[in-house]
Amino acid sequence: MTDSSRRHRPYIAVAGPGEATALETELARQVGGLLAQRGAVVVCGGLGGVMEACAEGAGAAGGTVVGVLPGGDRTAANPYVTVALATGLGELRNGVLVNTCDALIAVGGSWGTLSEVALALHAGKPVAALRSWTPPAEAASSGQARLLVEVSTPAEAVDNVLSRR
Amino acid sequence: MTDSSRRHRPYIAVAGPGEATALETELARQVGGLLAQRGAVVVCGGLGGVMEACAEGAGAAGGTVVGVLPGGDRTAANPYVTVALATGLGELRNGVLVNTCDALIAVGGSWGTLSEVALALHAGKPVAALRSWTPPAEAASSGQARLLVEVSTPAEAVDNVLSRR
Amino acid sequence: MTDSSRRHRPYIAVAGPGEATALETELARQVGGLLAQRGAVVVCGGLGGVMEACAEGAGAAGGTVVGVLPGGDRTAANPYVTVALATGLGELRNGVLVNTCDALIAVGGSWGTLSEVALALHAGKPVAALRSWTPPAEAASSGQARLLVEVSTPAEAVDNVLSRR
Amino acid sequence: MTDSSRRHRPYIAVAGPGEATALETELARQVGGLLAQRGAVVVCGGLGGVMEACAEGAGAAGGTVVGVLPGGDRTAANPYVTVALATGLGELRNGVLVNTCDALIAVGGSWGTLSEVALALHAGKPVAALRSWTPPAEAASSGQARLLVEVSTPAEAVDNVLSRR
């Protein structure tokens, strides 16, 4: 890969609960795989559940997976992470994950996931929500709410964020 | 004040948009005043809108107001902040604000506010929402969703968080 | 205190080892007391050793002591801290401490202390070193090295940083 | 590369000034190249000077270079970084860099570099200093000071940290 093409790869964050349902796990795996096939760097929280499933999917497609870990121990990363960052920032690492991505795909709902969705919208970055949070009715008219789009399938999620970043 | 009583003061975060409506401003001012009267330390983001109004209210009641600023310049704090922290963390300072408080009152809605609500719930801390975010229906059955309570008045908000912390 | 005078109070960080010698403890206590008498807000790491001694000294003089704690538990602060911030940032909290101060006094040496001295100099802030780190010979000609001044007594340390901030 | 071998790759941070001399640049380039040849992930601050030179050297040897940037804009990374993290943490990103590495090589001296050396020693991680900071005499007897070793050549620096991590 040339420097030039590498520099222009999209970085897409995938956020979701560390304890995921079977469906969320399968959706996240597909999202990771499709992102890697499209040349995106997958950025995730580096631990289990949705984070591990998207990493596994991306890894199986030969992709790069960055795990932005909350703790200071790099070995806590799931085995599919290709580059692990042990931030030592605790839950504030969600903000690093949001800062470094071009767009975010949320798979499933949890309060940690919601904080990432909110931070991404606050930063003006597109978010695709796959069986995840939906915009509150009272926010629907704001410009930032329009950044949050509900999607139905992994393919739609990936198409959506790559077309909007 | 004795060391002992000071150590046991509650720290209550007040979160809300930097550009607030007249109603949000008035509600935040009352929240700040009531918190100070009850001996709580008010923690806010240190800037304008709801942050400034709650600080003004607390200050008028002789309270302590900690402003946890995003930038590295302490003088950006609104004039009612009694102790200003220039974190240099950008929006990640929301996480510091949540870490240091016992409970959070959200006044009005914005994506920054939502990220603070989500981080507080994720950390297991009580949240009172005053004309702010309401729990998504799909989360209503979770334990953390029960931490988020809608309230109607500043007095109810303050009673709520001080009784639950 | 009026808002105006409060806004113009200097914020002086005091850094030093959590396990301090009797001499370091006594020096730090005097530094804290003199800073409070001069109207400065004392900012420290909030734990033991030099951090506790400077807070005790400042508290005895009626001063404000901000403890910027590494962990997420506010009650870890020493009893002399008047405002405790539980950052959850680990050792990265040293950077918050440096960002928020106008100048730094280092009492005694430790690697944590040295990191605070280096961050302060890197940020262009004056540092007074009391039985602490001295500038490496190879750096003596740089502008930033001149920000680091060795002092011999608590009074000299306080005079030095308050005159240079 | 198998997951297993990837998980056991060392992560070595290379720290040094953003404005480097010709000698520092050449030393950093060799350090980066040797680290990549030995299978280490190179972690750096992502910007210019020593950070760019070590990344260039590692990249020429086909290595992975993680750039932990201070700002929130990923495109600020030098062109040799293979994975860029836009932390938005400002100078506090030095702490993330130290948390995520097994050991650190300092090339040349600056106050930013010194803060990284001090944070690494404080965290108990080995440091090799190549034309950089030397341990203060007063610290020479401490266990942490022994973590800081002066080296004379890039090869010695790389051997030193890889044997001690």
Image: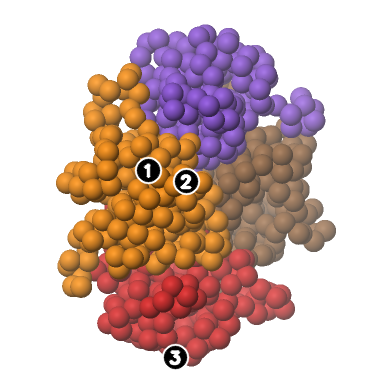
Chain colours: A orange, B purple, C brown, D red
The residue wearing badge 2 is A20
Secondary structure of residue under mark 2: loop
Residue most toward the right?
Answer: C22
* Residue B66, picture quadrant: top right
Q: Callout 3: residue from which chain?
A: D
Tell me where residue C51 appears, x and y as whole percent.
70, 50
Tell me where residue C127 appears, x and y as whole percent.
56, 56
Q: Tell me which amino acid carries mark 3.
A: Ala
- Between the residue at mark 2 and the residue at mark 1, the CA separation in whole angstroms equals 9 Å
Q: Is residue B141 above or below residue B24?
A: below
Using a 10 Å C-alpha cutoff, classify the residue at mark 3 as few (fewer than 14 neighbours), some (14 to 19) or many (20 or more): some
Q: Are marks 3 and 2 in contact (CB under 8 Å)?
A: no
The foreground one among B84 and A161 is A161
Q: Tell me which amino acid carries mark 2.
A: Ala
Q: Callout 2: residue from which chain?
A: A
Q: Is residue B123 visible?
A: yes
Which residue corresponds to the image point at 75% horizontal and 54% vertical from the top-left?
Answer: C49
* Residue B20, picture quadrant: top left
The residue wearing badge 3 is D155
Using a 10 Å C-alpha cutoff, classify the residue at mark 1 as few (fewer than 14 neighbours), some (14 to 19) or many (20 or more): many
Tell me where residue C55 appears, x and y as whole percent.
72, 43
Q: Earlier in the sequence, mark 2 or mark 1?
A: 2
Whether residue C26 sits left or right of residue D98 in the image: it is right
The foreground one among A42 and C40 is A42
Which residue corresponds to the image point at 76% horizontal and 59% vertical from the top-left?
Answer: C19
The foreground one among C6 and A165 is A165
The residue wearing badge 1 is A107
Q: Are marks 2 and 1 in contact (CB under 8 Å)?
A: yes
